[in-house]
Amino acid sequence: MRALELGTPGGLREELNSLVLAGRKTATTGLLAEYVEETEGLEFVGERLALLDDDGRAVATVEITGVDLTSFAEVTWEHAAAEGEGDASLEDWRAGHRRFWEREGTPVRDGTALVCLTFRVVQAA
């Protein structure tokens, strides 16, 4: 089973995992370039992934319910809201994600290719 590691290690990952386990976070977004760099294939609908904590332990099993390739500018409010991180608007979501990726060394533009995943928890660890 492949793994899903949300955010970056530390407080962010812990917070995001808590949102998933509480049922508030049912989506996430990644950079397509990272899939290419890591030579990792895209997730597929029905695939089950181990949701990992900072120590590599599974905290849940999630099942992918949707995979959408899109650009940064075309992410929908429906997807952004499903990320469950408390953004009040699509503009807030965009600003927060731009800051996150810039801190990680990958500034995004409107045309930056993204992978938008939706999922559901099938089993908590």
Image (cartoon, grey):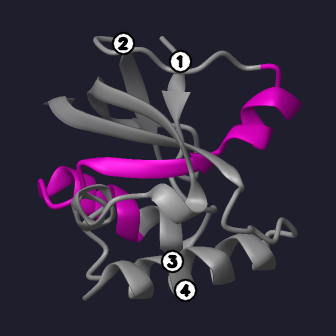
Disc 1 versus disc 3: nearer the observer: 3
Distance of label 2 from label 1 (alpha carbons)? 9 Å
Q: Secondary structure at mark 2?
A: loop
Disc 2 versus disc 3: nearer the observer: 3
Tags 1 and 4 touching, CB below 8 Å = no
Identified by mark 3, the residue type is: Arg
Distance of label 2 from label 4 (alpha carbons)? 30 Å
Q: Position of residue 117 (x, y in %)?
A: 40, 38
Q: Is residue 75 visible?
A: yes
Residue 95 is tagged as 4
Stretch of the chain drawn in magenta: 15-39
Distance of label 1 from label 4 (alpha carbons)? 30 Å
Q: Does residue 4 sit above or below 40 in this rendering? A: below
Q: Nearer the viewer, residue 56 or 90?
A: 90
Mark 1, residue position: 2
Instruction: State which tag comes first along the sequence, 1 or 4.
Output: 1
Identified by mark 2, the residue type is: Glu
User: Considering the image in quadrants, where does the C terminus appear?
Assistant: top left
Q: Residue at x 71, y 55 (%)?
A: 112
